[in-house]
Image (cartoon, rainbow, N blue to C red):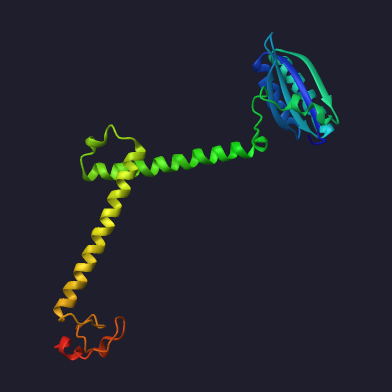
C-alpha cells in the first residue's frame, strides 16, 4: 500500500453511502477505493485515499451530506496506514476495487486464451456465413465449429490446388502454341524475340506488326 492516507465513512444504508462517495470525490482531491457492505443493519463503508488534508476534508464534507440522507454511524482517517491492513482495504468484498495488478500470470494467460478463442470463433462464423451464401449449410447443422473449420481449411487447400492446376494448364497451352519452346516476350510470344516481360513494347521484334 502507498503511504497515502485512507479514509472510511460508515453509513446506514447504501443510498447514504453513495451520497458520501460522491461528495468525497467532488469536495477534495481523493481517489475512491470502493465500498463494502458490512454484515447486518444495512451498514455501508465507503473507502477513499489521498493526502491527509484532502482525506480529512472529504470525510467531513461527506459526513454532513450523508447525514441528510440517512445516518453516519462512524468515520475514520488513518494518516499513514500499515502495509499489514492493505488486505482489509482492498479485498474481494470491496465493491468497485479493480484488481488489475493482482492478476497472476496464469490468469492473464487464461484471459488471453479466451480472447484468442473468441477471435477464432468470429473467424469461423464469418467463414460459415460465406458458405451459407454460396451453398446449403443444412448438412453441417450437427457439425461442431472445429470440424467445420477443418472442412473450410480442406476446401481452401482444394481451391489452391485447382488454381495451381489451372495455372499449369495455361502454361502448357502457351508452350504448345509455340511448339513447346519457351518465350520471354508476353506480347508476341515468339521464342526468338529478345524482349523481356516488363520491357518497352518497342523492343518487341513484332512491335510494328502489332501497331498496323
Quadrant where the image shows the N terminus: top right
In-image side of 114 versus 179 (left or right): right
**Is residue 18 in sight in this rendering?**
yes
Q: Residue at x 79, y 36 (%)?
A: 2
Establish if 163 lies above or below 188.
above
Establish if 18 lies above or below 26.
above
In-image side of 161 versus 45 (left or right): left
Q: Residue at x 15, y 89 (%)?
A: 209
Establish if 56 lies above or below 107.
above
**Is residue 57 in sight in this rendering?**
no
The quarter of the displayed image where residue 149 is located: top left
Q: Residue at x 32, y 41 (%)?
A: 148
Q: Where does the image place residue 39, in percent across and percent down from the top left?
A: 69, 12
The quarter of the displayed image where residue 198 is located: bottom left
Q: Where does the image place residue 212, in percent across and percent down from the top left?
A: 13, 88
Pick out the residue farthest to the right.
80
In-image side of 187 versus 13 (left or right): left
Q: Nearer the viewer, residue 149 or 38?
A: 149
Amino acid at each position: 500500500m502507498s503511504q497515502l492516507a485512507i479514509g472510511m465513512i460508515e453509513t446506514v444504508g447504501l443510498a447514504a453511502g453513495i451520497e458520501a462517495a460522491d461528495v468525497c470525490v467532488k469536495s477534495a482531491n481523493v481517489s475512491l477505493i470502493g465500498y463494502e457492505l458490512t454484515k447486518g443493519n444495512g451498514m455501508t463503508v465507503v473507502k477513499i485515499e489521498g493526502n491527509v488534508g484532502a482525506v480529512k476534508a472529504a470525510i467531513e464534507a461527506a459526513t454532513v451530506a450523508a447525514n441528510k440522507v440517512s445516518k453516519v454511524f462512524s468515520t475514520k482517517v488513518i494518516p499513514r496506514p500499515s502495509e499489514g491492513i492493505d488486505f482489509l482495504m482492498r479485498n474481494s468484498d470491496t465493491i468497485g476495487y479493480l484488481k488489475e495488478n493482482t492478476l497472476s500470470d496464469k490468469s492473464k494467460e487464461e484471459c488471453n486464451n479466451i480472447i484468442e478463442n473468441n477471435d477464432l470463433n468470429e473467424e469461423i462464423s464469418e467463414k460459415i456465413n460465406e458458405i451459407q451464401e454460396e451453398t446449403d449449410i443444412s448438412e453441417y447443422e450437427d457439425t461442431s465449429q472445429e470440424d467445420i473449420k477443418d472442412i473450410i481449411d480442406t476446401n481452401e487447400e482444394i481451391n489452391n490446388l485447382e488454381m495451381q492446376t489451372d495455372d499449369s494448364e495455361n502454361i502448357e497451352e502457351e508452350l504448345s502454341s509455340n511448339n513447346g519452346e519457351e518465350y520471354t516476350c508476353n506480347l508476341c510470344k515468339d521464342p526468338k524475340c529478345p524482349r523481356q516481360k516488363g520491357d518497352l513494347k518497342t523492343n518487341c521484334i513484332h512491335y510494328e506488326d502489332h501497331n498496323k
